[in-house]
Image (spheres, rainbow, N blue to C red):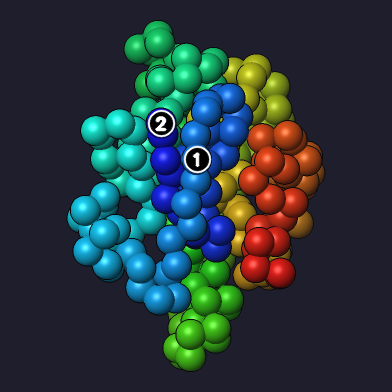
Amino acid sequence: MTTLYYHPLSNPSLYPVFIAEASGLDYTRKVVNLQTQEQKSDDYLSVNPFGRVPAMVDDDLAIGESSAIGRYLARKSGSDIYSEDMREAALIDQWVEFVVHHIRINVGRINFNRFIAPMVGAEPDQASIDLGLRFLADNLPHIEVALSGDGHLHGDRLTLADIALVAAFEPQHVAKIDISYAPVLSEWLERMRQEPWYQAVHTHFGAELGL
């Protein structure tokens, strides 16, 4: 049995959960209480010694890191959200890495300072917010071009790359990230959030916590 450890306010940890739903895997999910530092407990560290979410246990295999878990789940399911063809898999991976390193990280900067920092009593860093906004503005044109084709980052079907993009933008509304300058992406995100694999996880980001 596959078990995914995640937190509903952690967009990296939502990524493998979305993949499990989109690929039709039989799995269970467990929320890790980040407020009580459960991710640093001995029990959790035996699953993921990095002390972070997400993590996955599948029989005797335990791994962390969202991208690694995502690829494993996609391969295990045999779903066409990934590919057995090495060349096509590389093209999907390219987009996943682009999203993680140029989109998700900058959404994270903004989200931490606008949403998380006030919640935990930390001082927001406006310079970090400005940097995140600038890097998003620099990189979202590539996303706009890709989605303007067949409506997916790669090919004509849902892949890991698309799911990575949805997960990256999960905190969009709570962090008040304005992407109206990227209309194709804006409309696409709203459509993806109505998909069954998304709705099976939650109706919207933070719904589990009453946001």
- The quadrant of the rendering that contains the N terminus is top left
Contact check, label 2 and label 1, Cβ < 8 Å = yes
**Residue where numbered disc 1 is placed:** 28
Q: Secondary structure at mark 1?
A: strand
Task: For the C terminus, give its image quadrant.
Answer: bottom right
Task: Give the SS element for disc 2.
Answer: loop
Q: Which residue is mark 2?
A: 1
- Would residue 185 appear left or right of 146 to someone viewing this image? right
Answer above or below: position of 23 versus 51.
above
- Residue 184, position in %: x, y? 75, 41
x 56%, y 58%: residue: 8
Q: Nearer the viewer, residue 179 or 188?
A: 188
The structure residue drawn at horizontal position 40% and vertical position 9%, both measured from the top left corner, is: 85
Q: Residues within 10 Å of mark 1 (few under 14, many from 20)?
A: few
Amino acid type of the residue that numbered disc 1 sits on in the rendered structure? Thr
**Residue placed at 78% from the left, 41% from the top?**
194
Question: On the picture, is 90 further left or further right than 11?
Answer: left
Nearer the N terminus, badge 2 or badge 1? 2
Q: Can you name the residue that lies furthest to the top here?
A: 85
The percent position of residue 206, horizontal first and vertical second, equals 65, 63
Q: Is residue 33 visible?
A: yes
Please tell me which residue is depicted at 55% across the width and 63% down the height of the picture: 9
